[in-house]
Image (spheres, rainbow, N blue to C red):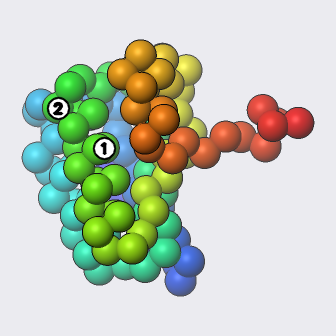
Amino acid sequence: MRVRGNPRAQVVRIGARLDAGTSAGVRERLHKALDTGEGDLILDLSKLEMIDATGLGVLVGAHRRALSVQRRLVLRGVPPRIMRILAVTRLNRVLHVEVPAAAVA
């Protein structure tokens, strides 16, 4: 997981898995990024292949923390498989998922 920042947003790249084995470390880094940065916190999920309930909990927790510090959590590059999981759990209605420009046109 890498964190890049600029004055208006931070980008965090998530690896291939967000599950019980990786959630603690990801949660800690997301909280640190939210507490120290400004602007949107963009999670690049383009490499994410697997997410479980623990990983979904990390996303929801980061979303809530972002709101508490007047920031916004944005999911970018969500693979179709992960998008289906977000849709089934209806988290796509809670979390802000960035839509590619080509999909809008």
Which residue is at the front of the view, 48 or 80?
A: 80
The answer to whether mark 2 and mark 1 are in CB contact below 8 A is: no
Give x and y (percent) for residue 97: 54, 42
Q: Is residue 100 above or below residue 35?
A: above
The residue that appears at 30% across and 44% down in the rendered structure is: 59
Which residue is at the front of the view, 34 or 71?
A: 71
Q: Is residue 27 above or below residue 86?
A: below
Residue 54 has which mark? 2
Give x and y (percent) for residue 52: 23, 23
What amino acid does circle 1 point to?
Leu
The residue that appears at 88% across and 36% down in the rendered structure is: 105
Give x and y (percent) for residue 50: 33, 23
Residue 31 figure quarter: bottom left
What amino acid does circle 2 point to?
Thr
The 10 Å Cα crowd at callout 1, few under 14, some 14 to 19, many 20 or more, is many
- Along the horizontal axis of the image, is 4 left or right of 105? left
Q: Is residue 40 above or below residue 54?
A: below
Q: Considering only order in the chain, which callout, 1 or 2, is on the residue closer to the N terminus? A: 2
- Alpha-carbon span between mark 2 and mark 1: 9 Å
Residue at the bottom extreme? 7
The residue that appears at 43% across and 56% down in the rendered structure is: 73
Give x and y (percent) for residue 71: 42, 69
- Along the horizontal axis of the image, is 15 left or right of 81? left
Residue at the right extreme? 105
Instruction: From the image, tell me which residue sits under label 1.
Output: 59
Tag 2's secondary structure? Answer: helix
